[in-house]
Amino acid sequence: MKHVLNQLVQLQELNFALAEHRATDPEARLKPLEESIAKLMEKLPADVARLYNRIQRNNPLVVAPIMRGNCGGCGVAVSSGTANDIRAGKEIFTCQNCARFLFYEEGLPRQPQKPAGPKRPLGAGIARFSDVNLMVPKLVAKTREEAITEMAQLLAAQGFVENPDTLVELALRREAMVSTAVEHGLAFPHVRNIEGGSLTFALGMKSAGVKFDGDGPSKLVFLIVIPTAASAFYLRLLAGLVRTFSAADARAKMLKCDSPEAMWKTLTALTRQHIQ
Ligand SMILES: [Zn+2]
């Protein structure tokens, strides 16, 4: 049954990618994604596919990782016997409380219990999701992998994640599925199912751009870590950032900043309207 579970995990990633593209770039690349999703759906056993569709109607998170013995979707405890069977890939299991499919993945990146960074205010726009210390005015990186690595190391150095290497690996795996670069030189590499903490991003800039895929180079790169519980909310953040930076003058103002402080001030002002 392990292959069915793998298909479910992949299906969920594709559905998230579809939602991301709908939120950011309504014209772009929907068809190939929809086709891949339909193909995967056909391969699933009929009862599993039915359950998948039913859960997805209510919530985008259908397949949840087991985290510290609990369902990553609803937080209810999973018995250690069931957890072991899931790890062994014997059967498909669903959470008894929320009915999500459960999977087990070693070494998912975690956020520290208490981020070392300054405590972020609640209900204060972009400050809920990032920090002046996560702004990089000039990325040293020349490639996509280097850019993701540079920002992952910053997130770790500032105490926002614990294992940057896994973060890089998972972000690249996500990029390999379908690029997170969108129009206007923006890219949103990300990792889902981060354990604990809150939705957080680092922003790196490079005026010459970093190549993410076949499109033009990405000049504003947001590396985003997404706790399981914030899966739906993440799409709203993404849409807000895209709305902000689809304006050419907003991008120009941002790219002019030459210090983290200037970036943070500009980002806060520019996103005020679109991210509450
Ligand atoms: Zn659950």
Image (cartoon, rainbow, N blue to C red):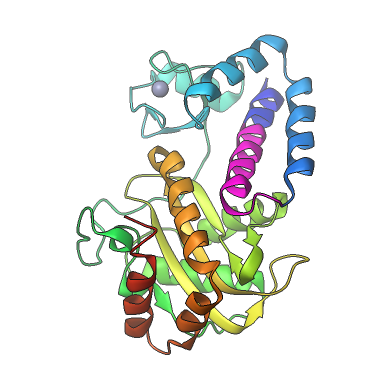
Instruction: Locate residue 127 relative to residue 154 in the image: left or right.
Output: left
Q: Residue at x 58, y 24 (%)?
A: 88
Whether 20 is drawn above or below 40: the answer is below
Q: Which residues are magenta?
A: 9-27
Image quarter in which the N terminus is found: top right
Q: Nearer the viewer, residue 267 or 3?
A: 267
- x 60%, y 20%: residue: 52
Horizontal and vertical percent position of residue 27: 71, 51
Q: Is residue 116 left or right of residue 269?
A: left
Number of numbered markers: 0
Q: From the viewer's side, name the closer residue of 50 and 262.
A: 262
**Secondary structure mainly formed by the magenta segment:** helix
Residue found 66% across the figure and 17% down from its top? 49
Quarter containing ligand 1? Answer: top left
Q: Is residue 108 visible?
A: no
Which percent across, then down, holds residue 223?
Answer: 50, 63
Quarter location, residue 129: bottom left
Residue 25: in magenta span:
yes
Residue 243 seen by the camera = yes
Estimate the x, y position of residue 95 in percent, counting from the top left: 44, 18
Q: Could you say which quadrant of the image residue 45 lies in?
A: top right
Q: Quadrant of the C terminus?
A: bottom left
